């Protein structure tokens, strides 16, 4: 009985995990190898046909490319801005640091849906504040469309993503900066190192684990980000900003082809699991270091 | 002592569970969308239904149109859908085919009930030999023209394509003297794939183009007249620059803001437009006219069909309380209830002949035009994949043609090929 007690205590948690994680995942895998149409119902087993259809769909390649750009560009830009602001905040210029750090974190606490709608209005061609400022300054024509232009729509969504993700990067960098031993800077100052050299030879190497974690986390979260793109562009115009999570929705709930939708979500899942393993390795490397 | 308490609790529970089962039947009603007036009216109607039908309790919840497909498919496919639901009438095909909606014509009194409605509207709820809903809130798409802009330019609302194109061109102008265009002739809803199709199809229909063949086996929107229709918009955008250039990003809110903000002279809307515009600008005046026809079809201006859409109330085929649900649907959609669509701005048209012919109806602005258009209007074809076909094949290719990425002929041919493969189940 004593031997069984720990397992019995674990049982509710295991059952819960099985229900909310394992069941949907297994069901999704099953759906991905069957003909599952919401209109026609569940059909025959078709092996990897759904995966082949997804890979041959012209929208898949476009969405995959867009998702890569969205994830990488969004994460890298957010990291750069986050690092710059963290360096400024780390200078501890009196009370202004506290106020600024509070203000800078606001985008992070906003729901992506709210942020998406806010950016949609900021970027509105005729009534948006951005166009008002830029056209008043004579930099653009009145009515310049950002979200309605296939060449700029994805960039705009990335901008909104950066705006939402940089506070998290900033907080992480700030914590990282504050854990760097001051002695290293003092020794460098004695040796006559410039600010520039101190940044590249002390600050950046010390922040490497934080950068790695942020990169992996940022890419994983961006890869999964449905809300921002869906609210701002719905993948348009003319699929120019279509990303994988939105494409899963298109397959599943517009074409009602759950099999194809499941196949794409499993492909994305496998990719993200690989990234997660990378994240865990980075994290464990950080702990041992 | 503890034992006594436990025994008492257990006995009480047993007694409660042995009590008489309640005679009240509970049904779930999911209401998607609707203007505020309609939602208030619905609540009042439910209260009066429960008073007149003491054996039935209605649990109503409001939901958004935006996620209607996801919500309904998720709930119906798992057997947890509501007893009663309101959806677009073209869901009759999808949900009828899937076996989610109950065929209302199997209720014995359907023969009498069907005579409440305009026959053309009731037909929209039919798929194959069954009727899957009772009509509610009919819509016919029309052209909305800013009165002040048209009057200032001294032009009348257009009836033909050439008048339409010319009006849009003349009303595209710089209004503040800085030489930059800040007013456009027409706005389209390119950021909402479904909304775009709903505003483009009326022009195709008016030009005599079929979306699909009558037997639903072949896509037909790429006919020569279909190509001509799309070419009209492509020319307006690329040659005349008379369509608002940012239209690819616009949803309903943006197009309404453009119209209310005096940035465009024309938009394509339904009967909700008066209420929507007056919420933002109560003083704004506008003409609502039939969608223009090709010049050579001017003699058919009054009879050519526009796009008809309609909301219907349906009963879940898996409902455990089919009769109660049917009673509720009838109560919501009977002739007396339909008068609310005449007395108040519900954003759509009444559907019963009694309400539409009532003396009060004669005082409603725009109603004669909409009734005339409804009589000839056609819905989208009742194909189970129609929403996907309209939103994901027709819309993106039309948009590509309008902005010049493809020629109208190539765009419609490619759209037709993709749509055809969806119909034939190859996709």
Image (cartoon, rainbow, N blue to C red):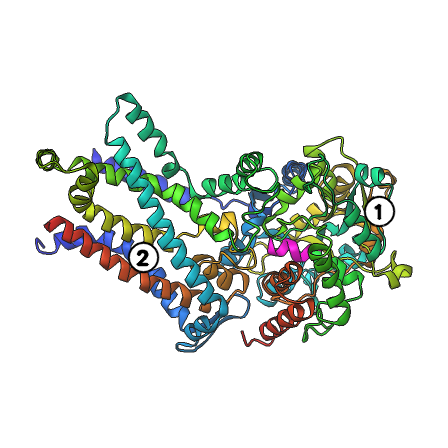
Question: With B369 as the anchor, is A179 left or right in this view?
Answer: left
Q: Which residues are magenta?
A: B192-199
In terms of secondary structure, where does tag 1 sit?
loop
Give the CA distance from mark 2 to mark 1: 59 Å
Q: Which residue is drawn at the image coordinates 47% and 40% (left, top)?
A: A114
Depth order, front residue of B271/A163: A163
Can residue B192 be seen?
A: yes
> Magenta: predominant secondary structure element?
helix
Foreground mark, 2 or 1, reads: 1
At a point 85% along the width and 53% down the height, the residue shown is B159
Residue at mark 1: chain: B
The residue where tag 2 is placed is A21
Q: Nearer the viewer, residue B71 or A133?
A: A133
Q: Which quarter of the picture shows residue A248? A: bottom left
Left or right: B399 as drawn, with respect to A172: right
Q: Mark 1 = which residue? A: B157
Rendering coords of residue A233 (x, y %): 52, 51
Q: Is residue B113 above or below residue A123?
A: below
Front residue of B68/A214: it is: A214
**Outermost residue, right side:** B299
Tell me what residue is drawn at x 22 percent, y 46 percent. A210
| SS under mark 2 | helix
């Amino acid at each position: 009985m004593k031997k069984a007690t720990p397992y019995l205590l674990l049982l509710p948690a295991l059952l819960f995990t099985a229900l909310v994680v394992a069941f949907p995942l297994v069901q999704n895998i099953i759906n991905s190898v069957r003909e599952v149409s919401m209109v026609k119902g569940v059909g025959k087993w078709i092996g990897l046909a759904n995966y082949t259809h997804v890979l041959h769909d012209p929208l898949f390649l476009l969405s995959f490319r867009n998702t890569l750009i969205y994830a990488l560009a969004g994460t890298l830009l957010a990291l750069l801005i986050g690092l710059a602001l963290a360096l400024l905040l780390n200078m501890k210029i009196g009370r202004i640091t506290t106020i600024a750090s509070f203000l800078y974190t606001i985008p992070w606490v906003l729901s992506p849906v709210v942020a998406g709608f806010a950016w949609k209005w900021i970027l509105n061609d005729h009534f948006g504040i951005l166009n008002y400022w830029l056209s008043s300054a004579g930099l653009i024509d009145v009515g310049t469309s950002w979200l309605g232009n296939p060449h700029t729509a994805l960039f705009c969504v990335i901008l909104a993503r950066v705006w939402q993700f940089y506070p998290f990067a900033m907080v992480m960098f700030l914590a990282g900066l504050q854990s760097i031993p001051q002695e290293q800077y003092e020794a460098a100052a004695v040796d006559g190192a410039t600010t520039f050299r101190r940044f590249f030879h002390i600050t950046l190497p010390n922040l490497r684990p934080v950068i790695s974690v942020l990169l992996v986390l940022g890419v994983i979260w961006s890869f999964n980000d449905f809300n921002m793109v869906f609210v701002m562009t719905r993948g348009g115009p003319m699929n120019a900003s279509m990303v994988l999570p939105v494409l899963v929705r298109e397959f599943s709930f517009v074409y009602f082809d759950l099999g194809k939708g499941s196949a794409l979500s499993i492909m994305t899942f496998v990719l993200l699991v690989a990234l997660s393993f990378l994240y865990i390795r980075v994290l464990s490397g950080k702990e041992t270091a | 002592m503890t034992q006594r308490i436990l025994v008492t609790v257990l006995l009480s529970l047993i007694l409660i569970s042995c009590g008489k089962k309640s005679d009240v039947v509970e049904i779930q009603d999911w209401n998607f969308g609707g203007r505020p007036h309609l939602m208030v009216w619905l609540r009042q109607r439910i209260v009066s239904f429960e008073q007149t039908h003491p054996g039935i309790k209605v649990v109503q919840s409001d939901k958004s149109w935006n996620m209607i497909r996801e919500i309904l498919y998720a709930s119906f496919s798992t057997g947890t859908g509501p007893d009663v639901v309101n959806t677009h009438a073209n869901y009759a095909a999808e949900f009828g085919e899937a076996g989610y909606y109950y065929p209302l014509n199997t209720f014995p009194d359907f023969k009498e009930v069907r005579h409440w409605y305009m026959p053309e509207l009731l037909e929209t709820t039919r798929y194959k030999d069954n009727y899957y809903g009772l009509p509610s809130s009919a819509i016919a798409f029309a052209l909305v023209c800013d009165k002040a802009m048209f009057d200032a330019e001294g032009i009348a609302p257009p009836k033909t394509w050439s008048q339409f194109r010319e009006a849009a061109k003349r009303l595209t102008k710089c209004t503040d003297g800085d030489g930059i265009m800040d007013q456009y002739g027409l706005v389209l809803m390119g950021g909402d794939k479904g909304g775009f199709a709903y505003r483009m199809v009326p022009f195709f229909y008016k030009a005599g183009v079929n979306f699909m063949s009558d037997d639903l086996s072949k896509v037909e929107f790429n006919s020569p007249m279909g190509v001509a229709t799309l070419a009209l918009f492509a020319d307006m955008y690329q040659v005349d620059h008379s369509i608002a250039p940012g239209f690819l990003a616009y949803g309903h809110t943006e197009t309404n803001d453009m119209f209310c903000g005096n940035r465009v002279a024309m938009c394509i809307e339904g009967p909700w437009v008066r209420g929507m515009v007056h919420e933002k600008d109560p003083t704004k005046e506008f003409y609502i006219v039939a969608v223009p026809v090709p010049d050579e079809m001017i003699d058919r201006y009054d009879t050519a069909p526009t796009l008809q859409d309609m909301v219907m109330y349906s009963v879940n085929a898996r409902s455990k309380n089919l009769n109660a649900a049917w009673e509720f649907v009838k109560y919501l959609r009977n002739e007396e209830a339909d008068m609310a669509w005449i007395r108040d701005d519900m954003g759509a048209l009444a559907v019963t002949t009694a309400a539409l012919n009532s003396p009060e109806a004669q005082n409603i602005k725009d109603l004669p035009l909409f009734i005339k258009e409804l009589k000839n209007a056609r819905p989208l074809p009742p194909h189970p994949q129609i929403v996907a076909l309209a939103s994901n094949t027709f819309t993106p290719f039309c948009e590509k043609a309008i902005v010049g990425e493809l020629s109208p002929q190539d765009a419609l041919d490619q759209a037709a090929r993709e749509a055809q493969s969806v119909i034939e189940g190859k996709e």
